[in-house]
Amino acid sequence: MKKIITFGTFDLFHIGHLQILKRASELGDYLIVGISTDALNFSKKQRNPICSQQHRMEIIKELKCVDEVFYEDSLELKRNYILESDADVLVMGDDWAGKFDEFKDICEVEYLPRTPSISTTELIEIVREI
Ligand code: C2G
């Protein structure tokens, strides 16, 4: 069985999130998703997500293309998460291109093109302006 792993915050879940998860799942037989905790998100983006980690996890785990979810507490633990889940391929959007090449010794690393013209940050800005 070919296992795929991917990571993200998936705040204000949108079509770009759905598309990367669907495309990631099509690369193998079993998709595992690491969901950034609120604390990790704050440390990465200096703001709290709009949706709590519990809500973000509930949404992701109900998707047909997703088989397993867990919380990603720290970027530094990525190697452990990949090894513990026994993943064959790490998939990320190409905004992360090159950033995870260090894991090529333990799995394949694939960067998929992002869905254009949508992001959580843009959604927040649009809603703010209304
Ligand atoms: N994404 C996409 N197209 C968009 C927006 C996002 O393909 N228009 C992808 C991103 O490239 C990422 C995934 O959706 O692979 C989740 O995006 P974010 O929630 O923004 O994830 P991020 O906060 O970058 O967390 O350890 C890595 C981090 O946890 C990634």
Image: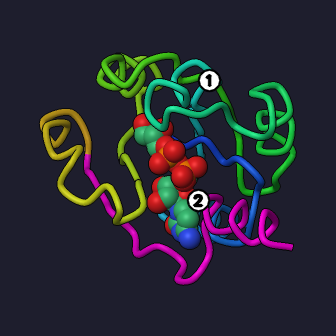
Residue drawn at the location 36% of the way across and 42% of the way down: 88
Task: State the image quarter where residue 115 is shown.
Answer: bottom right
The residue wearing badge 2 is 25
Task: Give the magenta range.
Answer: 108-130
Residue drawn at the location 41% of the way across and 27% of the way down: 86
The percent position of residue 77, horizontal first and vertical second, equals 35, 17
Q: Looking at the image, what colour scheme do you see?
A: rainbow
Q: Is residue 66 above or below residue 78?
A: below
Whether ligand 1 has any atom under 8 Å from the Cβ at mark 1 is answered as: no
The percent position of residue 96, horizontal first and vertical second, equals 31, 55
Mark 2: which secondary structure? helix
The residue wearing badge 1 is 37
Left or right relative to 60: residue 5: left
Q: How many marks?
A: 2
Give me the C-alpha separation between circle 2 and circle 1: 22 Å
Residue drawn at the location 87% of the way across and 45% of the way down: 62
Q: Which mark is residue 113?
A: none
Q: Is residue 104 above or below residue 43?
A: below
Judge depth for marks 2 and 1 and give the one in front. Answer: 1
Residue drawn at the location 77% of the way across and 40% of the way down: 50
Q: Is residue 2 visible?
A: no
What's the amino acid at mark 2? Ser
